[in-house]
């Protein structure tokens, strides 16, 4: 079997940021409008009054301080509370493809690759812009790649699940050089009008190049020592938006058509699942968690990551062992662990052992164990 490496990464950051203070101001204005509009029903006990959010609540609950978004005005409009995207004609590059191409070109530049070097494109994200044609095929054409492309969705674990597919494709010879791209326009499926989750997500796109070690020319190469995936069905993170909705005669803007979660149950169930998964994966490769130089974990909740690491290494750890990008980017679904890897790996020496791990709806957990090669 060929040795497989990650030879380049890329990151697209949207042009706008929303601070917690800005978000709280907009949410509270929406809550006031809602309460005023529904005052008779609230007074009659038919409907609960909306409670204000606060910066303190958000930061204590999540560790998030801001988020990047593609459209800021629509999200902060108390009469709208969602992004405003202009429809594009079919012959124009789609919004999701546009941000994917940006990240892809940066990853290809880092890896020393041209579009013609890519022979597989995997577009892996929590939500796709459309059902078909596959976003991956549009991205493939836009960067001038050959071979094949397909979309895949395992919610917040989409990136690590796609890395395993890319690694296996290179190992078995069905592809030489694979682009994995994660365009996450999470602002479009977040319910900005729900106090319990209105602060969670941000927009971003990550990309990475997976190829055989003997074709890699980049000085920044990370050998993939192993990948491990697991899923276990749970309804505690769910989004019911889909093409069957129109046949069910349901409201396309109903609460269940956007992100929903039972946060306390998710925290309680996913933390031990993720910690056990990482430990078992390392053991199959002959390593202990204490030998890992850096963990690049899914960025959903600061407390969740801290507890996972405490279970793995037996003590509280700082950003050097497990970098947190959550405060600046918020939860970016599948892209979170890849952002952490992209921004926090350059300082590590040859031979350093690392773990990229994501976890989310499904439940799903994916881990990628890597080791830095000598430049």
Image: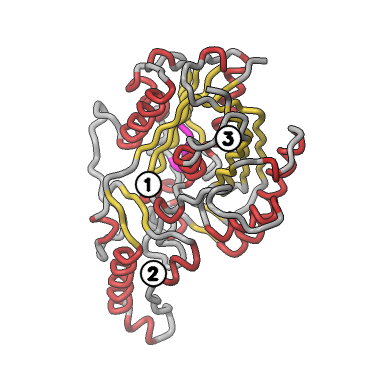
Q: Secondary structure at mark 1?
A: loop
Color theme of the render: secondary structure
- The residue under label 2 is 55
Q: Magenta segment, which residues? A: 123-127
User: Looking at the picture, does residue 29 appear above or below residue 340?
Assistant: below
Query: Which label sits on residue 203?
Result: 1
Q: Within 10 angstroms of label 2, few (less than 14), some, or many (20 or more) residues?
A: some
Cα–Cα span, label 3 and label 1: 20 Å
Give the residue at x 60% y 25%: 223
Q: Which tag, 3 or 2, sits closer to the chain's start?
A: 2
Q: Position of residue 73 (x, y in %)?
A: 23, 55
Q: Could you tell me which secondary element the residue under label 2 belongs to? A: helix
Of callouts 3 and 1, the N-terminal one: 3
Q: Are marks 3 and 1 in contact (CB under 8 Å)?
A: no
Q: Position of residue 221 (x, y in %)?
A: 53, 25
For discs 3 and 2, the disc positioned in front in the rendered view: 2
Taking the image as shown, residue 316 lies to the left or right of residue 35, namely right
**355 in the magenta segment:** no
Where 166 sits versus 65, above or below?
above
Distance in Å between CA atoms under marks 3 and 2 = 34 Å
């Amino acid at each position: 079997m060929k040795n497989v490496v990650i030879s380049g990464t890329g990151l697209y950051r949207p042009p706008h940021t929303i601070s917690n203070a800005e978000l709280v101001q907009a949410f509270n204005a929406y809550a006031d409008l809602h309460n005023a509009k529904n005052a008779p029903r609230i007074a009659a006990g038919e409907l609960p009054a909306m409670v204000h959010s606060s910066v303190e609540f958000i930061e204590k609950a999540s560790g998030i301080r801001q988020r990047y978004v593609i459209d800021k005005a629509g999200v902060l409009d108390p009469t709208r509370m969602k992004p405003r995207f202009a429809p594009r004609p079919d012959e124009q590059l789609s919004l999701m493809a546009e941000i994917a191409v940006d990240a892809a070109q940066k990853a290809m530049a880092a890896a020393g690759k041209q579009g013609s070097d890519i022979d597989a494109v995997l577009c892996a994200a929590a939500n796709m812009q459309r059902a078909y044609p596959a976003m991956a095929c549009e991205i493939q054409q836009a960067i001038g790649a050959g071979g094949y492309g397909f979309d895949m969705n395992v919610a917040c674990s989409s990136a690590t699940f796609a890395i395993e597919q890319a690694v296996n494709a290179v190992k078995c010879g069905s592809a030489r050089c694979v682009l994995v791209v994660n365009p996450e326009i999470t602002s479009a499926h977040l319910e900005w009008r729900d106090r319990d989750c209105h602060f969670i997500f941000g927009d971003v796109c990550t990309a990475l190049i997976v190829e055989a070690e003997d074709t890699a020319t980049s000085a920044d190469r990370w050998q993939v020592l192993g990948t491990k995936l697991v899923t276990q069905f749970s309804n505690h993170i769910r989004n019911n938006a889909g093409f069957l909705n129109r046949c069910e005669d349901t409201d396309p803007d109903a609460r269940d058509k956007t992100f929903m979660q039972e946060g306390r149950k998710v925290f309680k169930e996913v933390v031990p699942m993720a910690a056990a998964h990482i430990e078992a994966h390392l053991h199959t490769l002959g390593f202990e968690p204490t030998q890992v130089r850096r963990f690049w974990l899914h960025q959903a909740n600061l407390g969740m990551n801290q507890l996972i690491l405490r279970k793995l290494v037996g003590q509280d750890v700082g950003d050097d062992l497990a970098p947190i990008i959550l405060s600046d980017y918020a939860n970016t679904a599948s892209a979170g662990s890849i952002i952490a890897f992209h921004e926090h790996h350059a300082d590590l020496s040859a031979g350093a052992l690392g773990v990229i791990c994501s976890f989310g709806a499904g439940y799903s957990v994916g881990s990628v164990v890597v080791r830095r090669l000598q430049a």
